[in-house]
Amino acid sequence: MKKENVKLWIMQAVTIVIYFVSMSFTLFESGMDTDTLSGMLEDMLSFLIAFLLAYYLQIIVHEGGHLIFGLLSGYRFLSFRIGRFMILQKNGKLHFKKYFLAGTSGQCLMAPPDYQNGNYPSTLYHMGGTIANLIFTVLFLLIRLIARPQGFFNSFVNMNIACGLIDALNNGVPLKTKLVSNDGWNALHQKKDEDLNKANWLILKITEKQTEGIRLKDMDENWFVYDDSKGLKDRGNASLCYLRQLRAMDEKDIGLAKDLIAKLLKDDVSLNGLNKQLIKADKVYIGLLEKGKEADLSLLQEKDMQVFFRTMSDQPSIMRTVYAREMLSGDVQKAKRVKDRFEQMARSYPYSGEIETERELMDLAKV
């Protein structure tokens, strides 16, 4: 069994134990009314509300930690997201948008300082969320010990202690999940891998330009260079290759994109699961362009891909692939419904350049 899988199982077990102990302790302290069904349901509802408030508060605290420590490290604010709801700064103004990324409950994105002498400040930015969770966990623990809250507020305090501790552990202990790597993993490994360090900086710079509405094909071409002689076992070099594949799609250089996809989908390539699923979607799209109804759609039958397509159904490149499947299979009405949903999503999507790219790729499938 892989070491990373063992760590993931341990963290899941620890999470369950902390939640169970906290819930049991809170319900015991509250003197839950078990005499009547209505009283028991009322107590359970009160506890559930306290849990949900604490859960989302700790997400806000976590992302706020990234924001504060990012600003202290010389970063500039780009966007702040909780769930699907995002506040984005563009041209000096704040805009409300919608965006979702599988494997994350929130995200604070910032424009990084300059990349100088092969480095840039990253550790505090990565670990800021964990630090903030720990600070608030201690704060709520002190409130519990000193103020000795009662009733609903006691449940709220206890749940913040539990949620804050769990968020700190799940983000601070270096770990790779099925889709993404957490803050602790990035902070630990980035300093050991020059290519990964550069790739993470480039991702933030590219996001900065995307926030301004700039497309990948119009950005500095030097940002999309990887070392083919190194191979793609190295996580950083594989990330750089993935960025080049995304730019090839934007340039509509389908031949280059296809070659890069073949390299990126080899078993020994070190990429996170989220990127691999998106690459598979692009592979399906290209297959549809080349062969139409005769395209190999077996990737779409994989259980992981089916779950991914449902989870990321509002992601532009996923919608473009689904559109191409319906259009090139001859179901024009289904394709039209997908396109209408795409245009509806585009109105609140944060990156206008990406929307332009996907519209053109949809048109390519239509032609």
Image (spheres, rainbow, N blue to C red):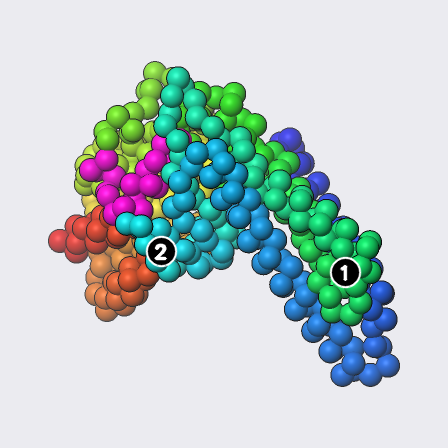
Please, is residue 64 above or below residue 124 in the view?
A: below
Q: Secondary structure at mark 1?
A: helix
In the rendered image, residue 205 lying in the magenta stretch gets the answer yes
Instruction: State the residue in front, 245 or 97.
Output: 97
Q: Secondary structure at mark 2?
A: strand
Q: Work out whether residue 167 can be spotted.
A: yes
Across and down, in percent, residue 170 comes to 63, 43
Q: Quadrant of residue 231?
A: top left
Indicate the quadrant containing the N terminus: top left, top right, bottom left or bottom right: top right
Foreground label between 2 and 1: 2
The mark found on residue 153 in the picture is: none
**Majority secondary structure of magenta residues:** helix
Q: Residue at x 32, y 20 (%)?
A: 228
CA gap between label 2 and label 1 equals 38 Å
Say what amino acid the circle numbered 2 marks. Answer: Leu
Q: Residue at x 47, y 28 (%)?
A: 121
Across and down, in percent, residue 140 comes to 72, 53
Q: Quadrant of residue 349?
A: bottom left
Residue assigned mark 1: 23
Instruction: State the residue in front, 298 or 91.
Output: 91
Please, is residue 231 above or below residue 6 in the view?
A: above
Q: Report whether 50 appears left or right of 77.
A: right
Residue assigned mark 2: 94
Region of the chain picked out in magenta, as a range? 201-219
Across and down, in percent, residue 192 comes to 52, 20
Q: Report whether 42 appears left or right of 241.
A: right
In the rendered image, residue 189 lying in the magenta stretch gets the answer no
Q: Residue furthest left?
A: 367
Assess disc 2: are there few (<14), some (14-19) or many (≥20) residues with their C-alpha within 10 Å of its C-alpha: few
Across and down, in percent, residue 133 comes to 63, 46
Say what amino acid the circle numbered 1 marks. Answer: Met
Q: Quadrant of residue 5?
A: top right
